[in-house]
Image (cartoon, coloured by chain):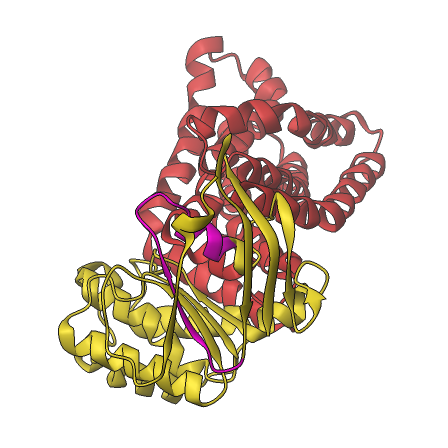
Chain colours: A yellow, B red
Amino acid sequence: MLEVKDLACLRGDRLLFRRFDLALGKGEVLRVLGANGVGKTSLLRLLCGLATPEVGEIRWQGEAIQREREAFHAALLYLGHAPALNDLLSPLENLRFACAAAGDTSSETDCRAALTRIGLARQLDLPAKVLSQGQRRRVSLARLFLAAHRPLWILDEPFTALDVAAVAELAEVISQHSRAGGAVAFTSHQDAGFSVPLRTLDISGYAA
Amino acid sequence: MNNAFIAVLRRDLLLAWRSRADLLVALSFFVIVASLFPFGVGADPDQLRAIGPGVVWVAALLATLLALPRMFSQDFESGVLEQLLLSQEPPVLWVSAKIAAHWLSTGLPLVVVSPLLALMYGLPPGAIEVLALALLIGTPILSLIGAIGAALTLGLRGAGSLLALLVLPLMVPVLIFGAGSVDAWASGIGLRAHLFLMGGGLFAALALAPFASAAALRITMD
């Protein structure tokens, strides 16, 4: 589904990695490894088209992602390591906005159900500023329940600040997505139990 | 209407309402700057009447400038801007919505308060309406031009002052024709030429600024 050829990443005037190749197919779950500062977040930002590669090409279903931007972004769910919440809005308002802005038509009932499922039933209408780090993370992860129709998930440190039970639940959601034919790429420093085979990739091997 | 446009417009207006104290700061700044001039130039009614429109316009311009950095910075820091850039909708739509919400929450209140300041400067009845009308056409141009600057300076050190340096020169024509429209009306030349020029400027800014801001945001987020 996603093909990367000969990718290089330049941050400022430092070359982070080069000659990076990757083919991510249907149902694959990829965990990107590497020490801090090696370029994991930069790689994920390149993969979802937020950054433009210095060298190399990224293709989605055979088309360069810059050329078919709208089709690619309709197929993509990216969750960055900032939870993308506004402190003055409640989790429900934040989630509804995130869905509507992305172009999804998720009803309020769907959003309530997603937040309840991720364990925020009692915080639905509180302003996001009173939530803990883990709860903030959960609000952004609630989008996973509403984005099963998007085949490619790119998640930057999704397990950060989550408790053990939430990590297990998230691993299960990712596994389900993979069984349904979706592809997932994520970074994590934490081990989680997946019920599908996990592919790992260490980008330290591509360091310049 | 488009999904993302409506969603962003509604959210930004809701946020503006929830943080209305911030908006009051810009509005009070407008009133205070405009009220400072009589202390400096003296209380001669004829002189005040002559400088009134210009003072109100400069104050409106500065108040707009004060509120500009807020247009994108919060969403930039929280990661919302990344999500918006990944939306399947074209960026121009939600950028337009953000500019519209910004004008409705900061520009429109200036227009509404301006008759009060015009009265303070002793402008005659017709001139008060002309000034408000010119501000109604002119302040959206300020927000549109300002959006390009706000997008370009996003995340930079000293973004606020850099933004002022970038956009103030571009706002000069609006100031000239905006403040000039009151004089033109008072001297009997008529308003049409000034208003048409500003209207033309508004349409040009409406057509170009959202594209330029969207492109600038892509570059700053890269």
* Residue A35 spot, x, y in % from top left: 30, 48
- Quadrant housing the N terminus of chain B: bottom right
- Image quadrant in which you'd find residue B157: top left
Q: Nearer the viewer, residue B12 or A150?
A: A150
Answer with left or right where residue A86 lies relative to residue B106.
Answer: left
* Residue A198 spot, x, y in % from top left: 36, 75
* Residue A69 spot, x, y in % from top left: 66, 64
| Residue A198 falls inside the magenta stretch | no
Q: Residue at x 35, y 84 (%)?
A: A196
Answer with left or right where residue B96 lies relative to residue A166.
Answer: right
Q: Nearer the viewer, residue A56 or A146?
A: A56
Q: Residue at x 29, y 80 (%)?
A: A194
Q: Is residue B218 above or below residue A80?
A: above
How many dots with numbers?
0
User: Quick check: can you spot residue A127?
Assistant: no
* Residue B84 spot, x, y in % from top left: 52, 60
Q: Is residue B127 above or below residue A33?
A: above
Q: Residue at x 47, y 13 (%)?
A: B43
User: Quick check: can you spot residue A13?
Assistant: yes
Q: Is residue B143 above or below residue A87?
A: above
Q: Residues in magenta?
A: A26-45
Answer with left or right where residue A170 lies relative to residue B35.
Answer: left
